[in-house]
Image: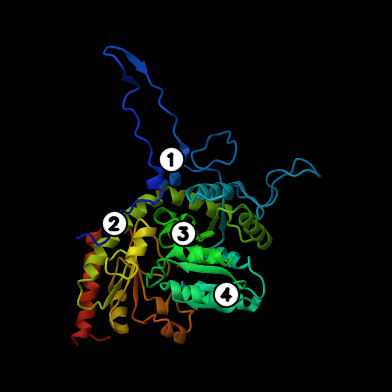
Amino acid sequence: MNICPGLNTRPPGNRERRVQPKPSTHRRRLGTRGTTTTMAIPPLDQRKLHLDTLMVDTVSVGEDPFQSSMPPIFQTATFGQPGATEGGKYDYNRSGNPTRDVLEKTLARIEDAHAAYAYSSGMSALAAVTRLLAAGDHIVAGDDLYGGTSRLLSRVVPSCGIDVSNVDTTSLEEVKKAMIPGKTKLVMLESPTNPRMQICDIKAICAHAKSIGAITCVDNSILTPLYQKPLDLGADISMTSATKFIGGHSDVTGGILAVRDPELAQRLYFVQNAEGTGLGPMDCWLLIRGLKTMALRMERQVSNCERLVEWVRTQPLVKKVNFAGLEEFPGNDVHRAQASSAGSLFSFTTGDEDVSRIICEHAKLFKITVSFGNVHSLISMPCFMSHASIPAEVREARGLPNDLVRLSVGIERAEDLIEDLAYAFGKAQEFVDGTRAP
Ligand code: PLP
C-alpha cells in the first residue's frame, strides 16, 4: 500500500531544476551518413542543479590557497584590518565570519533566497523575526506550535507591547478573521505542525497576509527546504531549526532564516549583528558537514517512517495517527500540493497516558528525547517534554492530549524499529490486560 500517494520524497525544486540529459559521447553523428561533427558539451548549468547536489556543493566565499576539501573553521573573534582607518571584509566575529558566510550562502542557494542567516538556535532565529515588529503591532500564530515558540509568543513578545492571537491555521477563514489590517504585521506558521502534524494552506495564508501588509514566517523545521520551500509558496521568511535535520546528529544547535527581499535581509542582518545571535564558526562548520548527508539521511528516514506508520496504524492500542502522508489525514490534499514528502515525524494517541508512557519506556532503539531529525529514532510524550512549557489548561483548550506520543524516525533498519515497537506495544497490552502494573 502506498500511504503517501503523490508524495515522491523528492525535493520540490527538482521539478524545475532537472538537469538536461547529456549526450552520451563526445562525438555525435549528424547529417549525411559518414559525416561526423563534434558537438560541444554544455558546461554544467549551476541554476539547474538538484537540491541534494546543492547541499553537497558548498558555496565558496573566497580564495583558499590550499583548496581544502572542507571549508576552514575560522575560530576567531577578531580579524586584522588593513589599516587603522580602513576596514577589511571581516573585522569581528559577531558581525561576520567566513565559515558562517559559507553556511549562509549555501543555504541561501538551496532556498533560492537573496540571503540566509544562521543563528545560535532555532529559537534565536524565531526571536529575530519578532524583532522586526514594534510595540502596538500584532502577530497571528498557529495554535499547535512547538512549545518553545508558544513560550516566546506568550511570555516574551507581549512584554514588548506586541499582541499575539493563536488560531487554528488549518482553517483559512479563522486565520483571515484573526488578521487585523494595519495592525497585524506578522503571521507565524508551521505546516506540518509540531506535534499534531496539522496542515495549513501556506500559499493562501501568505497571499492574504500580503494583501494586508503583513509578512509571513513559516517554521519549516519538520520538512526542511528539501521537501517544502516556503519562499516558493509566497512566505517572506523560511525558518529552519538546524538542530534537527541539517545537523542530523544531535550534536549542534542552530537556526536558519532565509529571505528573498533584500530590504528584509538587511533588517535581519542588522538584528543578528546588534543582538549577537549569529552562530559560532565551529557550529557553522558542523552544519555544513551535516548538510552534505542530509538528503540521504532524510530519504531513509522518510521511507522508514512510512513503514512505521503503516505498522502503528494497525495496532489495536492506537486510537489516532497524525501523519500528513495518510490520504485520509485532514489537509493531505493541501500538503501534496505544497510539499514533496510527508517527512519522518508522526504522532499517535492511545487514549491512556499510562499506555503511552509504557510504550515510550519499553522501546529501546527509540530514545526518549526531545527534538527530532536525528539519525537515531526518538520517542516522546510532547505534553511532558517539548511542549511542557505550555500551561496544561492551554494545551487542553488547544486539543493537545497528554497521551500523545510523537516519533521521529531515524536511519536504522525499519525491521529492527518495528520489532522494538512491537515489544513496547506488547508490554502496554499486558498493562491493559491487567497482567502488568502501570
Ligand atoms: N521549531 C520547531 C518546530 C521545533 O520543534 C523546535 C525545537 O524543537 C524549534 C523551532 C526550536 O529550535 P531550537 O531547538 O534549535 O532552538
CA distance for labels 3 and 2: 34 Å
Pointer 1 residue? 48
Pointer 3 residue? 251
Indicate if the residue with disc 3 has its beta carbon within 8 Å of ligand 1.
no
Labelled pair 3, 2 in contact (Cβ < 8 Å): no
Work out whether mark 1 precedes mark 3 in sequence or the reverse, and give the earlier one.
Answer: 1
Pointer 4 residue? 180
| Structural crowding at the residue carrying mark 4, measured as other residues with C-alpha within 10 Å and reported as few (<14), some (14–19) or many (≥20) | some
Work out whether mark 3 precedes mark 2 in sequence or the reverse, and give the earlier one.
Answer: 2
Labelled pair 1, 4 in contact (Cβ < 8 Å): no
Q: Given this view, does label 4 or label 2 mark the residue nearer the observer?
A: 4
Q: Position of residue 306 (x, y in %)?
A: 27, 61
Name the kind of residue labelled 4 in the image.
Ile
Name the kind of residue labelled 1 in the image.
Lys
At a point 41% along the width and 49% down the height, the residue shown is: 13
Farthest right residue in view: 85
Say which quadrant the N terminus sits in: bottom left
Work out whether mark 3 precedes mark 4 in sequence or the reverse, and give the earlier one.
Answer: 4
| Structural crowding at the residue carrying mark 2, measured as other residues with C-alpha within 10 Å and reported as few (<14), some (14–19) or many (≥20) | some
Pointer 2 residue? 6
CA distance for labels 1 and 2: 23 Å
CA distance for labels 3 and 4: 41 Å
At a point 67% along the width and 58% down the height, the residue shown is: 270
CA distance for labels 1 and 3: 32 Å
Labelled pair 4, 2 in contact (Cβ < 8 Å): no
Q: Is residue 202 left or right of residue 92?
A: left
Q: Given this view, does label 3 or label 4 mark the residue nearer the observer?
A: 4
Element at label 1: helix
Q: Position of residue 362 (x, y in %)?
A: 28, 74
